[in-house]
Amino acid sequence: MPTLILVRHGRSTANTSGVLAGRTPGIALDDRGAAQAAALPGRLAGVPLAAAVTSPLQRCRETLRPLLEARPELPLHTEDRINECDYGDWSGRKLGELSGEPLMEVVQRHPSAAAFPGGESMRAMQARAADAVHAWNARIEAAHGPDATYLMCSHGDIIKALVAEALGLHLDLFQRIAVEPCSVTAIRYTRLRPFLVRLGDTGDFGGLVPPPDAAGAGDGGEAAVGGGAGAP
């Protein structure tokens, strides 16, 4: 079965402003996100790709643009099932404001029970994204053989949920997974089981260095809903 390369979109204007973008239209990459996208073709140089599949949102399409310019022969497909989680009434709100909502504790501690008002549940998000991956695995294998590699560009919570599904982790544990903007995660699917061969690889270890004002501040351990902005 194929190998899937999951790319989270580059850093967006919503990431840097602390807004939960969700499916809000018109959210673009910021300058750093554009630079991350520009570096993607070099990072994937030498990796044969049978196809690229993208979430319909602008920030994913912008992330893939330099790769498609470098590989004009690479077919691009849009897949609605790997769209961002539908955060419903939470979309467009500041994450700092949302941290006080009672639902946020459920999202952090028991996400399999979390359903966003006016949106979807996190279980439904994971199920439709996993269905998309399994359908695309079959499609890519039929067209290009079992050793093919293809790419999907999607969103932080989607990728975390797909990693959890591949590892057999309950969705309630998916907040333990982190994927920064424009990170590369790779899952090799086989007849018996998937293998996680890369997780959140950016090639940049700056995110491991604590900021100067973090000394003694402690860490509450809350996961960034939507995936966060990554290293400063």
Image (cartoon, helix red, strand yellow):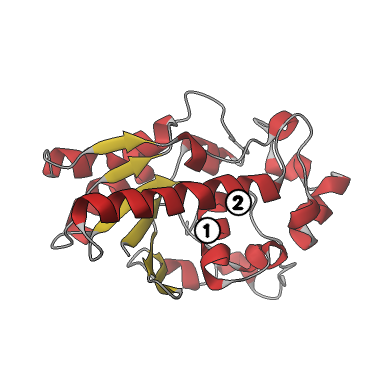
Spot occupied by residue 186 in the image (x, y as percentages of width and height): 37, 65
N-term-proximal mark, 2 vs 1? 2
**Residue 100 can be seen in this image:** no
Residue drawn where x is 47% and y is 58% of the image: 180
Residue drawn where x is 37% and y is 49% of the image: 136
* Quadrant for the N terminus in the image: bottom left
Contact flag, marks 2 and 1 (Cβ < 8 Å): yes
Residue drawn where x is 32% and y is 67% of the image: 203
Left or right: residue 67 versus residue 20 is: left
Asked where in the image residue 96 lies, by quadrant, the reply is: top right
The residue tagged with tag 1: helix, strand or loop?
helix
Residue closest to the eye, 35 or 179 = 179
Asked where in the image residue 165 lies, by quadrant, the reply is: bottom right
Spot occupied by residue 185 in the image (x, y as percentages of width and height): 40, 63
Residue drawn where x is 61% and y is 65% of the image: 213
Q: Residues within 10 Å of mark 2 (few under 14, many from 20)?
A: many
Task: Give above or below for 120 relative to 151.
Answer: above
Instruction: Point out which mark residue 54 bears.
Output: none
The residue tagged with tag 2: helix, strand or loop?
helix
Q: Residues within 10 Å of mark 1 (few under 14, many from 20)?
A: many
Q: Which residue is mark 2?
A: 126
Spot occupied by residue 161 in the image (x, y as percentages of width and height): 58, 57
Left or right: residue 169 versus residue 75 is: right
Callout 2, which amino acid? Gln
Spot occupied by residue 103 in the image (x, y as percentages of width and height): 83, 47
**Residue 97 can be seen in this image:** yes
Q: CA distance from mark 2 to mark 1?
A: 7 Å
Instruction: Point out which mark residue 162 bears.
Output: 1
Going by the picture, which residue comes out furthest to the top? 26
Residue closest to the eye, 206 or 49 = 49
Callout 1, which amino acid? Leu
Left or right: residue 96 versus residue 133 is: right
